[in-house]
DNA sequence: CCCCTGTCGCAATCAGCTCGCAATTGGGTA
DNA sequence: TACCCAATTGCGAGCTGATTGCGACAGGGG
């Protein structure tokens, strides 16, 4: 509707993946310096309510936003922070089991799976406490 | 070692599941009112480094802590907040696939799976935007 | 052109958590 | 038991991420 809203959408399209509210704010503010961060948050909220975008918590930091039209889960390395976009089918079986066993319908777009990426899964001298 | 630390452990044993730092602080402070919240955080941190406990992010709120000796994942309903403890085997296949496909070793104890529980998965008038 | 509704900009505020610092506490040693 | 060293504690300030209340403004309908 408004300029701020339109530019936020543009920023979302340009920021291909995992943009935080601050990232998006920076992009929007590059064009319209007056757009306040709270406006970004409010519009992000609105857009999410409309189902246009989804937000994900990739770890301890700020939430990431991306378009709902690119559904995927996330594999986040807790050592180096690498984020892998995982196709929804990776979660198909987990989803089926959760549903069968607990009647629980998972939302693979709205959570990150922590763990260790290929490079960090060797041994970091901490894990094997048996 | 110290009183604060010992009482924090006690609190962790008593608070069977999903205790937040503030919950634990309250429990500890019921006995030792002088124990400061920052001490709780520091000890929680230390205990986690030692592998005694793990913390999980169940959603938007504060992190939850529990003993590492009870490994499980979490299914959290994003509508009503219900938390289901999921046995690690629920994630076995996801883990195998992630490893095979991305070389990524998941940590089923350190993430919550958002979604909808049995009672909330009917239809809330939002989801089916296809 | 005016009014009305919704949105914006702003600063204050909140929640969750971390940090620096000085005093205290606990444990090991003699 | 007394002493000493280092780790730990209590405390408040501070930081990041996010939200809210409020007055001003903009844009669309009549």
Image: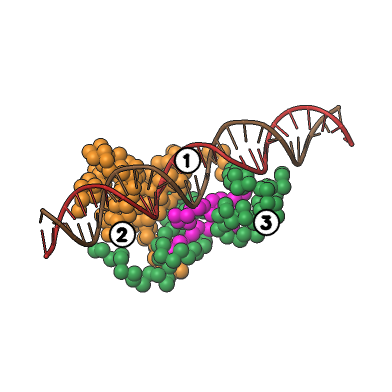
Chain colours: A orange, B green, C brown, D red
- Kindly identify the residue that appears in the image at 30 percent across and 48 percent down: A39
Q: Could you tell me how far apart the alpha carbons at marks 3 and 1 are, in whole angstroms?
A: 36 Å
Q: Are marks 3 and 2 in contact (CB under 8 Å)?
A: no
- Position of B82 compared to A16: left or right? right
Q: Of the residues tagged 3 and 1, which is closer to the observer? A: 3
Q: Quadrant of residue A53?
A: bottom left
Instruction: Name the residue carrying label 2.
Output: A49
Rendering coords of residue C23 (x, y %): 71, 35
- Classed neighbour count for the residue bearing mark 1: other residues with Cα under 10 Å, few (<14), some (14–19), many (≥20): some
Q: Are marks 2 and 1 in contact (CB under 8 Å)?
A: no
Q: Could you tell me how far apart the alpha carbons at marks 2 and 1 are, in whole angstroms?
A: 33 Å
Rendering coords of residue C17 (x, y %): 52, 45
Instruction: Name the residue carrying label 3.
Output: B30
Tell which subunit mark 1 falls on. Answer: A
Rendering coords of residue B50 (x, y %): 61, 44
Q: Of the residues tagged 2 and 1, which is closer to the observer? A: 2
Q: Could you tell me how far apart the alpha carbons at marks 3 and 2 are, in whole angstroms?
A: 41 Å
- Position of B49 compared to A87: left or right? right
- Kindly identify the residue that appears in the image at 31 percent across and 44 percent down: A36
Q: Earlier in the sequence, mark 2 or mark 1?
A: 2
- Classed neighbour count for the residue bearing mark 3: other residues with Cα under 10 Å, few (<14), some (14–19), many (≥20): few
Rendering coords of residue B71 (x, y %): 56, 56
Tell which subunit mark 3 falls on. Answer: B
Query: Which secondary structure lies at badge 1?
Result: loop
Instruction: Name the residue carrying label 1.
Output: A79
């Amino acid at each position: 509707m408004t300029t701020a809203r339109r530019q936020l959408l543009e920023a979302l399209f340009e920021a291909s993946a995992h943009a935080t509210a601050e990232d998006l704010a920076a992009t929007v503010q590059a064009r319209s310096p007056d757009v306040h961060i709270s406006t970004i948050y409010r519009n992000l909220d609105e857009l999410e309510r409309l189902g246009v975008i989804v937000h994900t918590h990739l770890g301890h930091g700020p939430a990431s936003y991306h378009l709902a039209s690119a559904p995927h889960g996330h594999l986040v390395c807790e050592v180096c922070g690498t984020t892998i976009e995982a196709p929804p089918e990776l979660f198909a079986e987990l989803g089926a089991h959760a549903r069968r066993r607990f009647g629980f319908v998972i939302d693979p777009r709205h959570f990150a799976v922590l763990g260790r990426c290929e490079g960090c899964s060797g041994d970091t001298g901490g894990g094997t406490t048996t």
